[in-house]
Amino acid sequence: MKRIIFLVATFMLLIVIPSNAQQPAPVKVEDGLLQGKFENGLTVYLGIPFAAPPVGNLRWRAPQPAAKWAGVREATKFAPAPMQGGNPQSGKSEDCLYLNVWTPVKSTNAKIPVLVWIYGGGFSFGSTCDPMYDGAKLAKKGVVLVSIAYRVGQLGFLAHPELSAESPNHVSGNYGLLDQIAGLKWVKKNIAAFGGDPNKVTIFGESAGGISVSMLCASPLAKGLFKGAISESGGSFGPTRPTTYPGENMKTLKQAEADGEAYMHKLGASSIAELRKIDAEKFISSGWAMAGGWPIVDGYVIPGDQHNLYEEGKYNDVPVLIGYNSDEGASFTHYKTPEDYIADVKNRYGKFADELIKAYPSGTSTVSKTARDLMRDAAFGWQTWSWARLQSETGKSKVFYYYFDQHPTFPKDSPFYGYGSPHGQEVAYVFEHLNTSDPHVTKSDLNISEDMATYWTNFAKYGNPNGKGVPHWEAFSNKHPEVMYFSQTPHMGSVPSAKSLKVLDAYFKWRRTPAGKAWAK
């Protein structure tokens, strides 16, 4: 009988040992032990809390420290995404402040560079669980890849006089940006446990994520939390405006507080205490736009007009890699006729409308790409160009500027004839997640993807995208305004639509004058 028990025990031990061998040893972070998993030659940790759940009385407050835990915490599944419209793969919850880590190293002494991803989604949507953001391929190029979540929509950006009054800084809104900063502080304190170098962190993001990167570069609260920044279709250099437009998205704290009061009234609440008791589902809009779903110039997280801050040299001066796509306007403009386009331009740009219509012609029978390019440049092109010029004038760190124009050449009978690269198309190239089974994906696409992933990870390693095996990327300067074109092959070129950008620049300069400010009201 004893022999049978011994054999059974031995058999069970043989089962257990290989099972345990399939898991990495728990890693110790500030709040406790984490159990990750081996995946694709990497060690992966998913759903790590970096702040306390922003629920109940913590709704619309700056993120608070996460609670410590006893024992070993499982970190093998994505946490829920923030509350939003749609249905992210990991679900959604108000309890959403978690991050993920992909590391290629086994030693805590490795100290390799860190790339921290900030998702886009118009500050109204987004999640870290999107398969497009899987960090495995970038991590395999020798970086620790981190993706952080942040609150979106009303739960992330609602401002209100009551909220400002209860804040020690007398401000409200921008909770989503404070989440990002809390995530970066967690990385600074804990990333060494995953083999990352806390002094070699680069932030990167696309769309709202790229705009966030721009804002973090201007925020004194983020000083010292990163050594490099990559912004894909981002930048926030437009002036504030009560009625917002792409490229003029920002409001003042006072304007946002008034919006918050109107929103509270709409929901039938009479106080923030009542609003905090409303189920989070009630804050989800059926449409894209969500009230309070954009950062504001609050004088604290964002001290002022970013263009002015950069002119004065008041920003986090780190190397930047910034750019945008050739047909961003295709994703946002829906003009049916040239007349629709002209009417919209006159409504938004006032006395500058005629000059801008000449610079960005409407077309005749159909709306041309040149018309779409006005939206592209107002929202992304001018923002990036201004960032590059201002940092080159007032900063010490290098600027690397790109223009993504990798797309099929559509035949004349195609409805997509004349179209370029739409908003967000480059993300799959950067993360190397092109669909290789798609017959439209060419060898050129795969080569561009490989080169972009190499440039991005080189930048994290060296503060410079250049290295072995990729074409040389010249740094941008106002004397030599060089831009890297991703089009069939990487190659240097001049600033796209430079003459048209100068007309748009004249509009934005005027908007900062007393006359321009008064007109915008």
Image (cartoon, rainbow, N blue to C red):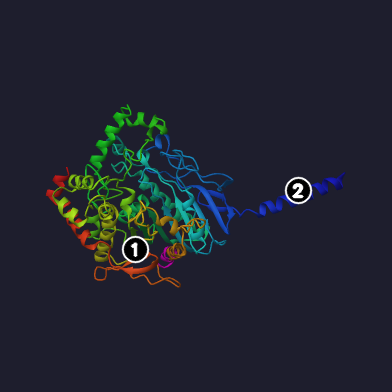
Determine if residue 398 is in view: no
Task: Tell me residue 213's x, y (percent).
Answer: 35, 54
Q: Dot 1, how many residues are within 10 Å of its Cα: few (below 14), some (14-19), or many (20+)?
A: many
Q: Which residues are magenta?
A: 455-462
Q: Residue furthest front?
A: 413
Determine if residue 333 is in view: yes
As rendered, which of 419 and 397 lies closer to the eye? 419
Front tag of 1 and 2? 1
Residue sitting at x 70%, y 54%: 18
Q: Earlier in the sequence, mark 1 or mark 2?
A: 2
Q: Is residue 142 left or right of residue 419?
A: right
Q: Which residue is mark 1?
A: 402
What is the secondary structure assignment of the residue under circle 1?
Answer: strand
Is residue 492 in the magenta section? no
Residue sitting at x 30%, y 27%: 270
Task: Tell me residue 418's x, y (percent).
Answer: 32, 56
Locate residue 489: give its quadrant.
Answer: bottom left
Task: Tell me residue 152's x, y (percent).
Answer: 38, 42
Q: Is residue 373 left or right of residue 208?
A: left
What is the secondary structure assignment of the residue under circle 2?
Answer: helix
Checking the image for residue 12, the label placed there is 2
Q: Residue furthest right?
A: 1
Locate residue 228: give its quadrant.
Answer: bottom left
Q: Amino acid at mark 2?
A: Met
Checking the image for residue 151, the label placed there is none
Q: Quadrant of the N terminus?
A: top right
Q: Quadrant of the C terminus?
A: top left
Q: Amino acid at mark 1?
A: Tyr
